Amino acid sequence: MLPTNLLPIASEIITLIGNSQRILVAAHLRPDGDATGSVSGLVKSLQKAGKQVDAALLDGVPERFAFVFPAIEVMRQPVIESNHDLIIILDSGDETRTGFTFNRDRQKTCLINIDHHASNTMFGDINYVDTGASSTCEIIAALINHAALPFDSEVALSLMLGLVTDSRSFQNEGLRHTAHLAAAKILQTGVDTSPILNMLNSGRCEADLRVQGFGLSNFRLECQNRLATLIIHQSDLKKLNASFGNVFASGLFNLLLSMSETFASVTIFEREDGMSFCEFRSRGGIDVKEVAVAMGGGGHVPASGCSRAAKVDELAEEAIRLMVKQVETFYAKQESACR
Ligand SMILES: [Mn+2]
């Protein structure tokens, strides 16, 4: 299941884990299914292997993913005085994405970066970055399988969460066969995946749907309908009795791409504390990661994001301008290639 070019790095990581007793596993701010699932899955496997393991997620475990974190305490203090033998950071393109400061003795504590984001900055002492992997959960499944670390139904449930959510239920463009190999390994454990199906199919709350309704009534179309844009102010959310988190859970980012003519979307919205966020999505090869990186964020070609302490309209002006340019450039290149 491991790409051949990454085998030497995998061996290094497996040796390091073997030689370590105290291990810290962390992932990014506002953890999604992949961050939550990969931390939880790796922590469970390492604990079952007899290691002393700490999990760290600065924003905690979102309620809807709580089923993969039974009885695991999660560290949430912004500065971690680490006396671990090993720190493993998952699903994060950059160390700052974790929100943590890890104070460590660099001679004693090695930092491993395991990720699948194309925008990864290779910030670790050891970097296992597989941009062809559907999810960090897919990578962890492959690694613990290769290392013969414990891989039972509890570990499997955690890893399936990120595999399913990051691959959009195995629908991502260019999905590699290894995603299905990881799923096969996971299902071989006999895991009951119904908590994930319930979360996906009937896990939304009223405010999520109200926000979805608002978005569907208020998006705009640009670039001959190829680009959908949506701005959600904090005042809109208040009227809907909703909060910032409901925007993520509304399903809007991908829903805007469900129109046959539309190949890119950007949603710009505001958090209660005045931070503003952009989420970019695309299909058909338009690189929205470039736009996110230009705005100080990161992600993947078809899905990326950024945030800034700025007014939502200010961020929206920049995001929409750059997205219009990105979409226009993409089609201009295609048309000149056809001639
Ligand atoms: Mn991911």
Image (tube, rainbow, N blue to C red):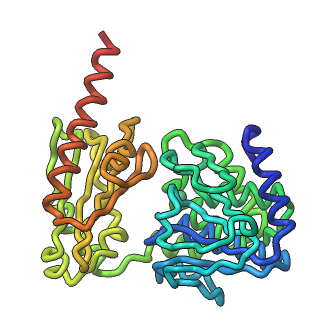
Of 278 and 173, which appears nearest the observer?
Answer: 278
Judge whether 5 appears above or below 22 on screen: above
Task: Residue 295: give x, y in percent of width and height.
Answer: 30, 51
Q: Residue at x 82, y 51 (%)?
A: 11
**In the figure, is residue 107 to the left or right of 216?**
right
Judge whether 206 appears above or below 180 on screen: below
Q: How many marks?
A: 0
Q: Residue at x 58, y 72 (%)?
A: 102
**In the figure, is residue 229 to the left or right of 144?**
left
Of 339 and 91, which appears nearest the observer?
Answer: 91
Judge whether 58 appears above or below 112 on screen: below
Of 162 and 98, which appears nearest the observer?
Answer: 98
Residue 154 in view (yes/no): no
Q: Quadrant of the C terminus?
A: top left
Residue 57 in view (yes/no): yes
Of 80 and 37, which appears nearest the observer?
Answer: 80
Task: Residue 151: give x, y in percent of width and height.
Answer: 79, 68
Q: Residue at x 24, y 79 (%)?
A: 272
**In the figure, is residue 197 to the left or right of 319?**
right
* Extreme residue in the top direction: 339
Task: Residue 85: give x, y in percent of width and height.
Answer: 76, 72
Task: Residue 195: give x, y in percent of width and height.
Answer: 57, 77
Q: Residue at x 77, y 51 (%)?
A: 10
